[in-house]
Image (tube, grey):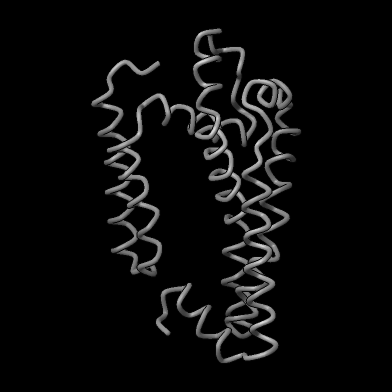
Amino acid sequence: MFENETQTRCAICGTGVLLGAIFLFAHFPVILLVVPVAVLFLGLVADPEETHAVWYGMLSTIGIFDLSALTDAERSYYAEKRHYFWFGEVAMASVLADMFAIPAGIFLAGRAEMTLAFIGATVLFLPLFVFLPKLIQRAMKADVDAAIKTFGKNEQVKKVFWTMFVAMAGLMLARVLDPATAQQVVGVIMGMGG
């Protein structure tokens, strides 16, 4: 477990501050400041053990988490923190899918209307969000069954997938019925104003 709680909290908070500074200086949309604020909040509020469970979930997603390295006491303790483990899995799956979906959206934005580019990036994001971590875990020969046995099946992936799917379907419907409104929604999401 963690040796120094203060050092862990400072590292997490420092990551949030650094990420926020990068987002500000790179002139990213203001909506993206939610990410560093969330990281900073986690550094202040979350127990280091909970943060460790999130980290294990992230490592599990990319297939490099070895559950056998934990003692029985740690395994049972982290099994109680399964929601944090699941959050780490969902966050890392989202990052992996975004590594492909965002550049595709940028590419499409130069060739099509912004609404279509956004829809295209979302259509690419959804299958990558679900299947890319599974492909990586299979390639790394990760023991996924042991993680499922300890932490349970992650139901959050389904919730995120269906939320994104419904949002995209709503945006496509708005694009068909009222293209101006759809353009405004995409503009607000991307931080370009209304």
In terms of image quadrants, where is residue 174?
bottom right
Asked if residue 177 is positioned above or below residue 102 in the image, the reply reads below
Q: Please provide percent x and percent y for residue 135.
A: 74, 40
Q: Position of residue 24 (x, y in %)?
A: 29, 63
Pick out the residue farthest to the top.
Answer: 72
Q: Please name the residue shown 60% across and 27% down the image.
A: 64
Name the residue nearer the viewer: 63 or 30: 30
Q: Residue at position x 51%, y 8% from top?
A: 73
**Residue name at image x 52 percent, y 80 percent:** 185
Residue 167 drawn above or below residue 16:
below
Q: Is residue 58 left or right of residue 188?
A: right
Above or below — where is 102 with respect to 192? above
- Horizontal side, residue 50 vs residue 11: left or right: right
Classify the position of the C terminus by image quarter: bottom left
Q: Quadrant of the N terminus?
A: top left
Who's the residue at 54% across and 12% down the image? 70
* Residue 157 percent across, percent down from the top left: 65, 46
Quadrant of the image occupied by residue 120: bottom right
The tally of labels here is 0
Return the x and y of residue 28 as percentages of the image width and height.
38, 67
